[in-house]
């Protein structure tokens, strides 16, 4: 594949897709991958218009770039899986969010472009990361076949994925995963955990640089990055 634009956690910032469109037009990125969490942000539960604007912006981007890969984030799945007590969940926007995610899926070249995990060449993309412990616990008998692991994970529901070590929740940034990530030889690109700049650790980068703290201040440098899915190199755009 080569060079891919990574769209980080969005959290109700529709202008992120406008900037991503400009990057796709003006750079040599061949494809885009979004690591999820399109919805929810601090104190925004009542701003239904912002939910709609953000998802409309995502759908426009998907229609223009239907090969884009989209990873579900925990905030996205909270609506699809009726997790009403999830932080930031908007009861007022819930039905609309579910309907618009269906429209997003229908805008892609394949419904499989919206999933938990995607693999391009030597790179895995997911919202939070695929940990060795999760795969060992859930898919021990499939550990020798990465494609089977990915297919199984993408078929899981709330009963398996709504736990701390899953690919929508795990936080490898904290250094408390005794067995690291799975598989060892692939590069992983994740969001989920806000960082001040793209964080590189061993064979994983964290790209959640657009998120804010509860008082509205940006935590990160708000810079996009690209990833070469073959060579595992990355850089800012």
Image (cartoon, grey):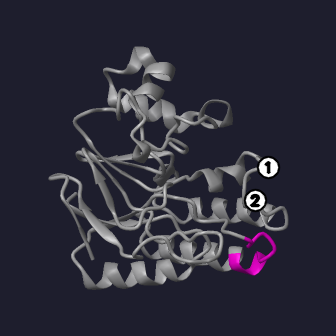
Please give the range of residues in magenta. 43-50
Q: Find residue 44 and report its horizontal and vertical position in percent.
A: 73, 73
Q: Is residue 64 left or right of residue 183?
A: right
Q: Residues within 10 Å of mark 1 (few under 14, many from 20)?
A: few
Residue closer to the observer: 181 or 91 = 181
- Which of these two is toward me, 113 or 203? 203
Q: Quadrant of the N terminus?
A: bottom left
Determine whether 172 is above or below 136 in the image: below
Q: Where is mark 2, residue-wise?
A: 89
Pinpoint residue 5: horizontal percent, then vertical percent: 32, 68
Residue 4, how many percent across, how many down?
A: 28, 64
Q: Which residue is mark 1?
A: 85
User: For mark 2, does the 10 Å Cα neighbourhood hold few (<14), some (14 to 19), or many (20 or more) residues?
Assistant: many
Residue 65 sits in quarter: bottom left
Residue in the picture at 52% in, 34% down: 165
Answer above or below: position of 230 versus 107: above
Find the distance from the CA under tag 1 to the CA under tag 2: 7 Å
Which quarter of the rendered picture does the C terminus lie within? bottom left
Looking at the picture, tell me which residue is in the foreground, 89 or 123: 89
Report the residue at 42% width, 38% height from top.
130
């Amino acid at each position: 594949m080569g060079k891919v634009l990574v769209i980080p956690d969005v959290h109700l910032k529709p202008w992120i897709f406008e900037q991503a469109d400009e990057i796709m037009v003006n750079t040599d990125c061949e494809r885009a991958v979004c690591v999820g969490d399109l919805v929810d942000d601090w104190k925004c539960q009542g701003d239904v218009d912002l939910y709609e604007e953000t998802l409309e912006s995502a759908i426009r981007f998907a229609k223009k770039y239907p090969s884009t890969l989209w990873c579900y984030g925990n905030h996205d799945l909270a609506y699809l899986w009726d997790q009403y007590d999830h932080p930031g969940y908007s009861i007022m926007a819930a039905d609309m969010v579910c309907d618009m995610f269906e429209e997003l899926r229908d805008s892609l070249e394949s419904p499989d472009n919206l999933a938990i995990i995607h693999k391009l060449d030597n790179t895995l993309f997911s919202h939070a990361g695929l940990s060795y412990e999760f795969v060992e616990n859930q898919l021990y008998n499939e550990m020798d076949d990465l494609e089977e692991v990915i297919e199984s994970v993408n078929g899981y529901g709330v009963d398996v994925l709504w736990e701390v070590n899953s690919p929508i929740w795990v936080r490898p940034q904290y250094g408390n995963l005794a067995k690291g990530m799975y598989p060892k030889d692939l590069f992983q690109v994740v969001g989920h955990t806000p960082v001040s700049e793209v964080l590189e650790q061993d064979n994983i980068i964290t790209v959640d640089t657009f998120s804010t703290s509860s008082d509205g201040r940006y935590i990160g440098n708000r810079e996009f990055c690209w990833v070469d899915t073959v060579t595992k190199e990355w850089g800012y755009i």
